[in-house]
Image (cartoon, coloured by chain):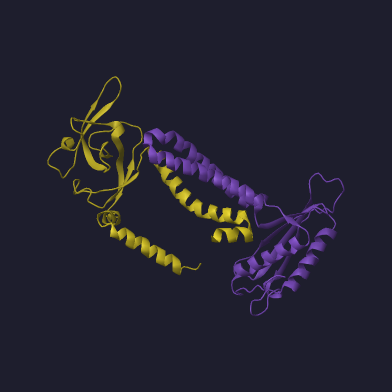
Chain colours: A purple, B yellow
Amino acid sequence: MQSKVVVNTSSVGELKTACDAGLKEFLKERGYEEMHTHTDVKLVLGYLGIIFCAVDFAYSWKYPFSQTKWFSYISVSVYAVTSALALIYSYVVQRDTFFVGYNKAKGHIVSAGARTERNEPTYRLTLTTRPIRGRQDPPVYNSKPLEMKQPFAAWFHDDGEFARQKFNSDIDTAIEALFTKKTE
Amino acid sequence: MEFLSQAKKFGVRSLLLQGLTFLSVLTSAFMIWKGLSLFTNSESPVVVVLSGSMKPAYDRGDILFLHNGFSPIEVGEVVVYKLNDKPIPIVHRVMKVHTESESGEQYLLTKGDNNNADDRGLYNPGQMWIQRNEIIGRVKGFVPYAGMGTIWMNDYPYLKSVLLGTLCVLSLFSND
């Protein structure tokens, strides 16, 4: 079904990436379709800036500086604004989130974000859920995010192979906790 | 063709994201240059000195930082100008300035410190003065000989290919 994943166990980055990918696959298998909103926002902002830059490059290549100055003012401003917005979006809105998925059948959205501390082999996962906007039936809705942390050693063999089943069952427990925890 | 296989495997988005990462390096460099250019009101805010006509102040290979702005040029300032037909920028000192009283239009005469004659021999045929709008900028700072690499690559074109080749080989040996 899925190929074996082997990582370098001394690289916290690789360990985190493997877990992120594992969580994505887990949720996708459980019927969560990925929502690409974060990626799309950054793509739109990025390419908007790039288009203005490309046009400005072509225009100022062909015509002298004094003639094309007015457009350069516009394109530099657009580029600065879109870059700033993309950066702000990344730091304020997206933060650690690497997967957002919606489950049509159950009527809710699950958002997963993960962090690691420097040189510490621990996976810090944050799961949040919110109802899909506009749904009639009251779906399971929990306003408090669920945080769980586990040392990577729990999910990787000595040789670096990813222990998918153990990972999946731990995540399963976490997801259930996310939906059964009552808001306080 | 590996685009298509990546597109099938990871989707168009991943391709677009990779493209974005690569292009933002190029575009941010260009935009920073443009921003500097607009700030200094100069079409080329950094130039390399190509001749020794301004010795001992500036020598061949020096990198000059220019700021043009909008204010009138004064006698004694070292300016960089380009004449319409020639692509090479000239770095010389302003010797005389005439200002038209009504329009404020300036007429300038320049001369290289290390030259015996003023620049009228360099100007376009029949041109006795250069004008404010032909000035690319005034020299505000410099780094001695930092531009020798550019000069060598223009004088010996094969060096460009050597540099490009070295960069390609190095990139092959980098991590991915």
Q: Residue at x 80, y 52 (%)?
A: A104
Q: Is residue B161 left or right of residue A168?
A: left
Q: Is residue B29 above or below residue A17?
A: above
The x, y position of residue A13, in whole percent, is 60, 67
Q: How many numbered dots are placed on residues in this image? A: 0
Q: Quadrant of residue A64?
A: top left
Q: Is residue A131 above or below residue B161?
A: above
Q: Residue at x 49, y 36 (%)?
A: A74
Q: Is residue B49 left or right of residue B34?
A: left
In the orientation shown, which residue stands out farthest toward the left? B116
Q: Is residue A154 left or right of residue B6?
A: right
Q: Residue at x 74, y 59 (%)?
A: A127
Q: Is residue B133 left or right of residue B25?
A: left
Q: Is residue A12 above or below residue B25?
A: below
The x, y position of residue B90, in whole percent, is 24, 42
In the orientation shown, which residue stands out farthest toward the right? A137
The x, y position of residue A18, in whole percent, is 65, 68
Q: Residue at x 72, y 72 (%)?
A: A164
Residue in front for this viewpoint, B92 or A2: A2
Residue in front for this viewpoint, B32 or B78: B32
Q: Quadrant of residue B148?
A: bottom left
